[in-house]
Image (cartoon, rainbow, N blue to C red):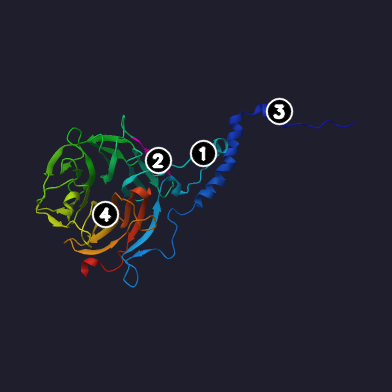
Amino acid sequence: MIPRRLDITMPLRRALPPRTYLLALAMILGPFQGGCQSAAKPVFPQLEPAPVWPAAPDQPRIRYVGALSGERDLHRVPSGWEALRGVFTGPRPPIGFLTPTAVAVSDDLVFVCDRQLGGVHVLNLATRDYALWTSAGDERFGMPMDVTLCDGKLAVADARRKVVDLFTLGGEWLSRVGDGLLERPASLAWDASRRELWVLDSAAHACLVFDLSGELKRSIGGRGAGPLQFNYPAGLAYSPALGALVADSMNFRVQIIGENRSPVIFGDKGDAAGNFALPRDLAVDSAGHIYVLDSQFENVQVFDRAGRLLMAFGEEGSDPGEFSLPSGITIDASDRIWVADTYNRRVQVFQYLSEDASWAQE
């Protein structure tokens, strides 16, 4: 007589709930996916040779690092339950930039303001995590235009809602600044020594200075072409060594507002080196060089603190170091230069070669 085969699978199927099978599968997938995560592609693949400016035989001052166009560039590999969910439902399409207008950087955290998408992209270059902020408290963003770091918080200028919103770096909404006082907040800067938030109001042609409680401390400007007057200003930065810097767009110049309130002014309308067509934003590196982003020239011109032109880089196009109507520029604590290359739907990153002799000494 042939012995009946012992079938142990059916009792086990009856005994184990589906969640147990999923948990077991997740435990199998987890270590494997974790190993893949550690071997993820670099966020900025190295180009050989890396583009530099100026080109040889001149000594390079700026080196191209790479570009971000959204979540995809984090090369994140899902693990655990996320990986398992993807087996059954398919991977979620990565979110890309639509119209990046401004960037703020805190160590490995990159915040990208996206006007058309109506949100702020948050990319963690270390953990490869991604988030998209689309609301401030109980209100959705209207037209976020700029972001800046202030006292361990993130400030977001919303031109349509006419306010500046404050968040923790983890995304918790804290408060609003300038409600009822602003017409079109376009750019932000933080004075750490005085703990003051500068807000550039392009419609009021003025800079409004607040503390973080929202109290208005003072207002500088008004429409005109004289010192401390502006004509549709677009960009703002703050340097401890120089003071507040304003891209006074339709006056085709830069104004530096120092301690004595007597501004340093440089720039003229024109198409020669050192002239401006549409100065859109600016930033300052650790050596005090002033980077002015021009949306119409589609380049960055670099000046010393007296307004003398040192060099320029960029032109129209989509290759590394080329731009299409760029809107924002910032320089982080490591002297990386981040440019919101708006109509190329990306953020380009460059490195100021600070180990070289400073231009300011030349």
Image quarter in which the N terminus is found: top right
Q: Earlier in the sequence, mark 3 or mark 2?
A: 3
Residue 55 covered by magenta stretch? no
Residue type, numbered disc 3: Pro
Span shown in magenta = 129-134
* Camera sees residue 286: no
Whether residues under marks 1 and 3 lie with C-beta atoms below 8 angstroms apart, the answer is no
Q: Nearer the viewer, mark 1 or mark 4?
A: 4
Q: Secondary structure at mark 3?
A: helix
Residue that label 1 marks = 82
- Real-space CA distance between mark 3 and mark 4, rounded to the nearest whole angstrom: 70 Å
Query: Which of the numbered marks, if any, corresponds to residue 11?
Result: 3
Q: Nearer the viewer, mark 3 or mark 4?
A: 4
Query: Which of the numbered marks, if any, corresponds to residue 131?
Result: 2
| Rendered location of residue 20, percent (x, y) | 60, 32
Q: Is residue 293 left or right of residue 265?
A: right
Residue type, numbered disc 1: Glu
- Which of 47/25 is in front? 47
Query: Which of the numbered marks, if any, corresponds to residue 293?
Result: 4
Q: Is residue 165 left or right of residue 48?
A: left
